[in-house]
Image: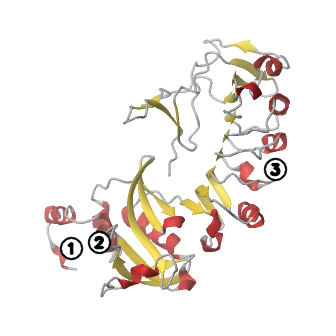
Amino acid sequence: MELLKLPYLVHLKILSCLEPFEHFFLGLCSRKSALLIRRVRHNFDATTIDLGHYTIKTQNNGTRGDDLIMWTTYYHPKTIDLLTGVFWNQRIKLKYNGRTIRCRITIHPERKIPLLWCREKHLKALPIAINSAICDVFNTSSEIRIMADMDQLSEFPNIDSVDNLLEYSRSVDLIEYQNFFDRVNIRNCARLSAGFFLKPNSSVFSVNHLNCCKSKWLTREHLLSFRGQSALFQSATQIKNEDLIAFVDNWLAGCNTKLQSLMVNGNVFRPDLGYDKDTILRNFETRPWNPEVRERRFKYPPGMKYLSRTDVMDCAFGVDILRERDNLLATILIDSNKFRFFVWHDRFPKDNEPIIRPAARHMPPCYVIGTIFF
């Protein structure tokens, strides 16, 4: 390759004129070209596989980046109109899990990014193959982050585990939906947006960080089944005072040693159905915040990012309970239809200043909670 024979400063000048996807294709040519690409400073450190839009997206420090590359199959009903594009003369070969996938290339007419075409038999392997190759060329995080339309599970990659999953759907086969979470291991974080029922014994309740946007199905049994580090259940309209009491009792009995944070938001449209603070707390031996015992602000674990207009990690007005068997301290905060439960594995955490997103357009300033973002 003639490019590699040029001086290093010339390399940088040429590469600065290329698009990220051109860097990717160049990095696939040889190990030397990949090393050259790694010397260039890129504005992303991770990637996300968006299955619903057949796109690999870039990310930087937990913020959404740009669309990098697309994939599809010949005569796929959602992309068949794009077959009218002109194919490049050069094909691309990707290797994954012992399989070689040969693709042809066009440029999307509107998004101006490459679209890789493959045979239908490679549809489930191609997005993982592309993502793996991108991580290798750019030397970025190899974590597998997937955004999945659960109505298209027939196209979900042939893998048995992912690191972070964001699911969404308007309709889904409930049996297939349940089986998916039993079949695919989510190693770190899951955000469930569709709001479909999950069995209490589902393996999803062992995910490190769980965020359920629509939790009308949530019951006491689900709360007691959670074995991860952090959970946020929103619109949990079935949860009552006695369910939260049972959850705290369960924690005091030592049934969850990993738990750091659990938050339940009830019915925001019915404040009359909110949680009664006195009814819940009178069942436990509580004490007010003591600055000598713990920090004021809880350090949220590295779960799914979300925004809050108030600092929900401020525990100055919470009450503390102690689990005597291991001396773990927990803080309970109850405010109308919001229940927060924080466990202090580190009572005086470092680097715990709040992160505030400035006001933008019609949005007021917000506190940023969590680090994982799709």
Name the element at disc 1.
helix
Q: Are marks 1 and 2 in contact (CB under 8 Å)?
A: yes
Query: From the viewer's perspective, is 257 left or right of 369?
Result: right
The residue tagged 3 is 200
Q: Tell which circle, 2 or 3, labels the residue nearer the N-terminal end.
A: 2
The N terminus is located in which quarter? bottom left
- Give the amino acid at mark 1: Leu
The location of residue 33, given as percent across then percent down, is 29, 71
Q: Tell which circle, 1 or 3, labels the residue nearer the N-terminal end.
A: 1
The residue tagged 2 is 33
Quarter holding residue 329: top right
Q: Is residue 45 visible?
A: no
- Give the amino acid at mark 2: Ser
Of 41 and 196, the residue lying toward us: 196
Q: Label 1 neighbourhood size at 10 Å, few (<14), some (14-19), many (20+)?
A: few
- Give the amino acid at mark 3: Pro
Q: Label 3 neighbourhood size at 10 Å, few (<14), some (14-19), many (20+)?
A: some
Q: Which residue is rendered at x = 31% and y = 64% of the image?
A: 20
The location of residue 235, given as percent across then percent down, is 69, 40
Q: Which mark is residue 4?
A: 1
Cα separation between marks 2 and 3: 50 Å
Q: Is residue 70 visible?
A: yes
Q: Which mark is residue 152?
A: none
Of 98 and 201, the residue lying toward us: 201
Name the element at disc 2.
helix
Image colouring: secondary structure
Quarter holding residue 168: bottom right
Mark in front: 2 vs 3: 3
Cα separation between marks 1 and 3: 57 Å
Query: From the viewer's perspective, is 44 left or right of 95?
Result: left
Q: Which residue is rendered at x = 83% and y = 16% of the image?
A: 282
Q: Are marks 1 and 3 in contact (CB under 8 Å)?
A: no
